Structure formats: C-alpha cells, structure tokens
Image (cartoon, helix red, strand yellow):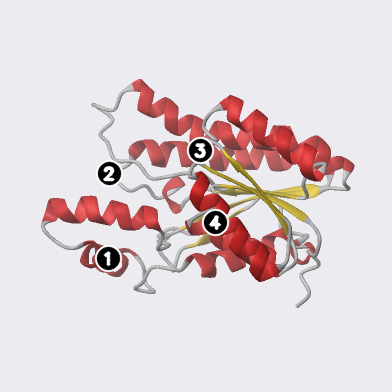
Amino acid sequence: MDLQLRDKVAVITGGSVGIGLAVAEGLASEGVHLALCARNEERLNREAQRIRDEFKVEVMTFPCDISRQSDVAEFIGAIQSHFGGADILINNAGTGSEEKIATADDEKWQYYWDLHVMAAVRMSRGLMSAMEVRGGGIILNNSSICAAQPLGYEPIYNTTKAALSMFSKCLANECIPLNIRVNTINPGLIITPDWINTAEILGKKTGISADQYLENLAKEYTPIGRFGTPKELADFFVFMCSPRASYCVGSTYYVDGGWLNVVK
C-alpha cells in the first residue's frame, strides 16, 4: 500500500529512543524527512545519522528538554528555519512515574504536567499555522492506556495522560477547519527502555528479576500474553499519518494487546 507520505516533514518529540525512535524509522522508511528532539544529544545524533544512512532522508536534530517552554520555542524556531514548518507532529515525549498522592510534591506534579500536557499544547500551537499554510497536516498525541485504565503506582502519570487525551479531543475539533487531523494513540504494554527501568525498580522490591516482572505483568494484564514491540506500535502511527487514514479524526485508538477491560 502506498501511504503517500514521501517528502513530507515530521516532527517527533522524544525521537531518539523507544516508541519515538521506532516511529521515526517507520516514517523514514516511507521517505519522510524528520525533525527530532531529545535530551540525550549524543544518542540523538547517533540515531539520526543511522536513519540518514539507512533511509536516505533528511534528519534535523535539536537537543532539548521538551518540558521547558523556552526549549520548545527554540525547537519550533529551528524547525521553521530548517524546513519552513512541518506536515506531521508526533507529540511523543514522556515517561512513567512512581509516587503516592499523599506524598508527591507540587514540583513533581508540575514537571509531568509540563512534559505530558504543556509540551503538546506548545508544540501544536507553534506548528498549526505553518501546517495550515502547507495545506493541512497531522497531529498524533501519544497518550497511554493509563489515561482510561490507571496503574496504581503512578497517579501523576495517569492523570496527566488523561489530560493529554482530553486536550487532543478539543484540539481535533478546533483543527478540522484547518485540514489538520488530530488523534490520540493509547499504547498498552510496549517494551521500551523506560519499561525495563521500571521493571528493574519494581521487580527488586518484590525480589524478582526485571524479565520476570515484565513476563508476569504481560500475563496478568494482556489477553495476548506479551508486550508489544515499538515497531508494532510504530506501524500504526505511520498509517495514521497517511492520507489512507483520512476519515480518522478526533478519536482515541488503543494498541494494547486486548488489555482495555471496557468497551469504548
């Protein structure tokens, strides 16, 4: 299937590892040029060069912390200067949390709010006008199944991802007249370095290895009985960026191995 994406420009936050990197590779395989940001400059540049070499596309990199308003503004400015805007925005950057509501301080709440919600607000707001000028575009917000079905150990993550999903729905309605399609993707268990780190921490508390923790989790929560791979999820992201998904707008899509326990 021709996804009709060649020579489009895609912006991906958190694009150097895990889901963001897999989406970058998937889009690059379709001939999409990339603007990637991440905090780890060395890894970002290394992965960008690998993508350039493998897929023969242009890759712009910008090391930054997307939770900071000034960094977002500078990244948007660099995108405008380098590409003149973008056709696709993937608001992907994020990470899990671990806390109790009774003891988590305001600073931690604010950090996750800025990372999961305000980064998407600022990136979307900063690129929408240029998308409209280019004839329209795509915004995909990477939320989580935890936005609807929370895990007990990360209330801040659950809350901010739920807010991201609502923002995405509101943005979708506002963007339809601009020919910009906005959707949310709610992954379930996807094996990323972030999950491995979480498994090491939580597994140690119960006296089991990270691998055993992950295996137990997958068997407990998913009918499919395993974690998904970043590439499996990225294939769905890439399709949703395509004109082939032109009637998909303002919705939330679960890619979760059957984990969601309600009909939505």
Q: Earlier in the sequence, mark 3 or mark 1?
A: 3
Q: Earlier in the sequence, mark 4 or mark 2?
A: 4
The residue singled out by tag 3 in the image is: 116
Residue drawn at the location 60% of the way across and 68% of the way down: 235
User: Could you give the CA–CA distance between mark 1 and mark 2, rounded to whole angstroms?
Assistant: 16 Å
Q: Quadrant of residue 22?
A: bottom right
The residue singled out by tag 1 in the image is: 220
Camera-side mark, 3 or 1:
3
The residue singled out by tag 2 in the image is: 153
Q: Earlier in the sequence, mark 2 or mark 3?
A: 3
**Type of amino acid at the residue the image marks with label 2:** Tyr
What percent of the width, then of the height, locates residue 71?
59, 30
Crowd band around label 4 with a 10 angstrom C-alpha radius: few (<14), some (14–19), many (20+): few
**Type of amino acid at the residue the image marks with label 4:** Arg
Crowd band around label 3 with a 10 angstrom C-alpha radius: few (<14), some (14–19), many (20+): many
User: Could you give the CA–CA distance between mark 2 and mark 3, rounded to whole angstroms?
Assistant: 17 Å
Q: Is residue 264 visible?
A: no
The residue singled out by tag 4 in the image is: 46
